[in-house]
């Protein structure tokens, strides 16, 4: 058992360290797979095995060259042809996934039908399988076209959508007469896929909500070449009665954490909390705000426990509710056990891509890296809200996942009701 656990840990670490190389290989396979499908669907041309290998190798070489030469600046500064090619490559990954799943289902279904027919007539099985090729070709082609249309919508319209989500909560430890409106934004990603006009519009939308406190939960910057002098003064226009508290995310560290903090302090009046805390006098009571620095295990996963956080919680004033700002949501179970009242996180972008599911749930890509992908969670009286972010990373697309401003409307719990 210990050997299996060690192998699993090693394999997981290896996978995440090489994720982007593997993703590039998967995209290259998908691109060629879509090309090969079109050739077969349109003209019945079937590629030999060596043809598939050659096609994947050639596309992978092109992709490696393009990604190696791509600048670190804003994605919108890249040539239009490169942006279109990049988007097409990304869409092909999902089209090819649809093809693979459909083919697996067809093989199983046709195999069963063929087995039943073969039992009745020796040559019947082959006839059944061959007869299904036409409908299968039509179904897959239609499905891939549908996937493409959805993604075109995500690129053209989905990424422009902005929603304000209101979350009413009653917090333990907060004075009963206290009300507090906390506006949370996250994952702004200044430096890529964001224009000055978009940021100005986002800030105006936040200020119109008249928040008491604004919290920014990381990934303020996207890359080392972000234009801080142009964007941060606009970000600094955020207004709230108790000010703005901000923490750093993994992309802020990629960009140079010390420089991001220095530029924030130059252009804004934010409280930048790096394993630090501040106690705010709120109404008839207090709120203790802890902000942790990002210490993820890799680009995808955060830490499950944190000695520095434990120390910060232990140093908090007695009988004062704690608001924890943590870029990654993974630490939530520990925060709940430590007695944190409310935790705000980001990082996941809500998956950026999601599909509607049952009971209003939207299944999304972030579920592959965390149990807390988007929205509100509760454990042992502690609440976590995971914001879907204002920016995008990688591809400028959002599908069933609008950009988000969260308004957590907090009120104190009545001690009498807490006892019942």
Image: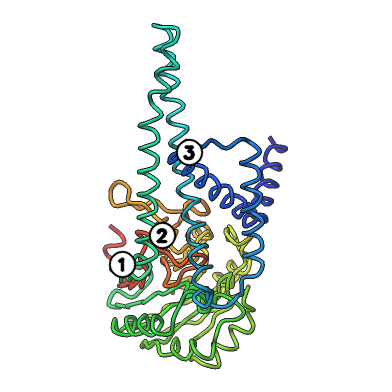
Upstream in sequence: badge 2 or badge 1 = 1
Residue at image coords 42%, 87%: 243
Most distant residue in the bottom direction: 266
Residue at image coords 40%, 36%: 137
Distance CA(mark 2)–CA(mark 1): 13 Å
Upstream in sequence: badge 2 or badge 3 = 3
Q: Quadrant of the N terminus?
A: top right
The x and y percentages for residue 272 are 53, 83
Taking 365 as reference, is 55 left or right?
Answer: right
Q: Quadrant of residue 420?
A: bottom left
Asked if 205 appears above or below 357 in the picture, the reply is below
Q: In this view of the protein, can residue 51 be seen by the observer?
A: yes
Residue at image coords 63%, 60%: 298
Name the mark nearer the viewer: 1 or 3: 3
Disc 1 packing (10 Å; few <14; some 14–19; many ≥20): some
The x and y percentages for residue 411 are 30, 72
Label 3's element?
A: helix
Residue at image coords 58%, 84%: 261
Residue 167 is labelled as 1
Label 1's element?
A: strand
- Out of 352 and 219, give the one closest to the viewer: 352
- Out of 358 and 293, give the one closest to the viewer: 358
Most distant residue in the front direction: 43
Distance CA(mark 1)–CA(mark 3): 51 Å
Name the mark nearer the viewer: 2 or 3: 3
Residue 40 is labelled as 3
Q: In this view of the protein, can residue 317 be seen by the observer?
A: no
Residue ID for mark 2: 374
Asked if 92 appears above or below 221 in the picture, the reply is above
Disc 3 packing (10 Å; few <14; some 14–19; many ≥20): some
């Amino acid at each position: 058992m210990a050997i299996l656990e060690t192998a699993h840990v090693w394999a997981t670490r290896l996978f995440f360290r090489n994720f982007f190389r593997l993703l590039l290989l998967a995209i290259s396979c998908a691109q060629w797979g879509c090309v090969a499908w079109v050739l077969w669907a349109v003209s019945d041309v079937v590629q030999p095995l060596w043809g598939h290998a050659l096609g994947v190798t050639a596309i992978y070489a092109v992709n490696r060259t393009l990604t190696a030469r791509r600048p670190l600046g804003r994605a919108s500064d890249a040539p239009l042809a490169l942006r279109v090619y990049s988007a097409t490559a990304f869409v092909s990954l999902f089209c090819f996934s649809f093809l693979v799943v459909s083919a697996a289902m067809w093989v199983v279904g046709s195999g069963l039908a063929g087995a039943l027919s073969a039992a009745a007539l020796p040559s019947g099985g082959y006839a059944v399988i061959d007869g299904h090729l036409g409908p299968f070709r039509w179904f897959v082609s239609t499905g891939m076209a549908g996937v493409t249309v959805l993604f075109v919508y995500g690129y053209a319209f989905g990424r422009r959508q902005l929603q304000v989500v209101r979350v009413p909560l009653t917090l333990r430890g907060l004075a009963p007469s206290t009300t507090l409106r906390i506006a949370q934004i996250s994952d702004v990603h200044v430096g890529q896929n964001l224009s000055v006009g978009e940021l100005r519009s986002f800030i105006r939308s936040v200020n119109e909500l008249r928040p008491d406190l604004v919290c920014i939960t990381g990934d303020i910057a996207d890359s080392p070449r972000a234009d801080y002098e142009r964007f941060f003064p606009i970000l600094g226009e955020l207004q709230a009665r108790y000010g703005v508290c901000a923490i750093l995310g993994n992309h802020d560290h990629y960009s140079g954490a010390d420089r991001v903090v220095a530029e924030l302090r130059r252009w804004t009046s934010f409280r930048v909390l790096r394993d630090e805390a501040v106690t705010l006098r709120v109404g008839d009571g207090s709120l203790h705000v802890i902000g942790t620095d990002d210490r993820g295990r890799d680009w995808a996963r955060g830490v499950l426990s944190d000695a520095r956080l434990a120390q910060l919680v232990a140093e908090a004033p007695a009988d004062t509710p704690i608001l924890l700002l943590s870029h990654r949501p993974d630490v939530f179970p520990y925060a709940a056990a430590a007695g944190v009242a409310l935790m705000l996180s980001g990082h996941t972008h809500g998956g950026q891509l999601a599909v509607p599911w049952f009971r209003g749930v939207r299944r999304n890509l972030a579920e592959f890296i965390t149990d807390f992908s988007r929205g509100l969670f509760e454990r042992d009286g502690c609440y976590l809200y995971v914001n879907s972010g204002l920016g995008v990373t990688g591809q400028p697309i959002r599908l069933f996942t609008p950009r988000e401003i969260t308004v957590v409307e907090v009120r104190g719990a009545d001690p009498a009701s807490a006892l019942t």
